Amino acid sequence: MDYISKWVEAIALPNNEARSVTAFLKKNIFTWFGTPRAILSDGGSHFCNKAFAGLLEKYGLKHKVARPYHLQSSGQVEVSNREIKIILAKIVNVNRTDYHVGIEELNLDWAEAANLRMTQLNEMEEFRLHAYESASMYKERMKFVYDKKILKWEFNSGDLVLLFNSRLKLFSGKLKSKWSGPFKVVSMSPYGAIEPESEDGTQTFKVNGQ
């Protein structure tokens, strides 16, 4: 499976030995798509052996072995394998003697996929614009729902207000109040920020009025 495009290239092999794996890479991967920068695999014996190491050295490739149960490195492969197994279970016969037919039915063939392109390239720009408009509409709806929950407070110069201490919301003390003050409002901006003065009246600071 390609790391970027998630393209899966699958064929039926007679066995799971190193010779079959190296032959598959040379015939079905290197000749069709070129040599990759690196190959990421598990620590199976069909990948960690002298024949596979010789193939890597010949083509100048790096071999990265994924750690077991590490979803960040092998999670996508596990998901693809699970989907392939589900499809094969519905296609192959009870004796499981026609795996090669099932693989062909998966439509994982490069030539077949190229001939049966579902979307024309000249339609891609239209799809991009549609996706952009859908994302913009979704953001507008989320903003509308969020703004409905916010109460708009109006303060005037000279009002006395209490200041909420957000730190005590995370680290609360039983005998401590989450509010301090009162503070005297000196001015208020049209965007909701207010400027109260300190309790001793020596300095002012800006806070969110919401």
Image (cartoon, rainbow, N blue to C red):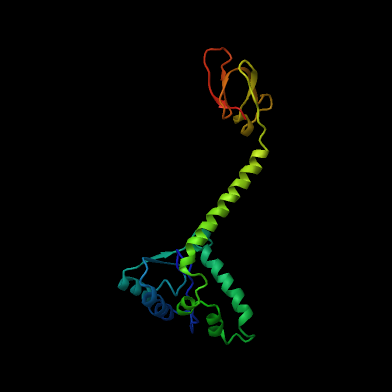
Q: Is residue 46 left or right of residue 171?
A: left
Residue 168: % across, % down: 62, 29
Give the residue drawn at x 59%, y 14%: 199
Residue 194: % across, % down: 57, 24
Q: How many marks?
A: 0
Give the residue drawn at x 55%, y 81%: 105
Give the residue drawn at x 56%, y 50%: 136
Q: Please determine whether, in this image, residue 43 is positioned above or below residue 167.
A: below
In this rendered view, identify the residue nearer to me: 154 or 89. Answer: 154
In this rendered view, identify the residue nearer to me: 115 or 198. Answer: 115
Residue 207: % across, % down: 56, 26
**Residue 65 visible in rendering:** yes
Q: Quadrant of the C terminus?
A: top right
**Residue 70 visible in rendering:** no
Residue 25 placement: quadrant: bottom left
In this rendered view, identify the residue nearer to me: 107 or 101. Answer: 107
Give the residue drawn at x 67%, y 24%: 177
Q: Please determine whether, in this image, residue 142 is positioned above or below residue 4.
A: above
Residue 178: % across, % down: 65, 26
Q: Please determine whether, in this image, residue 62 is positioned above or below residue 196.
A: below
Residue 2 placement: quadrant: bottom left
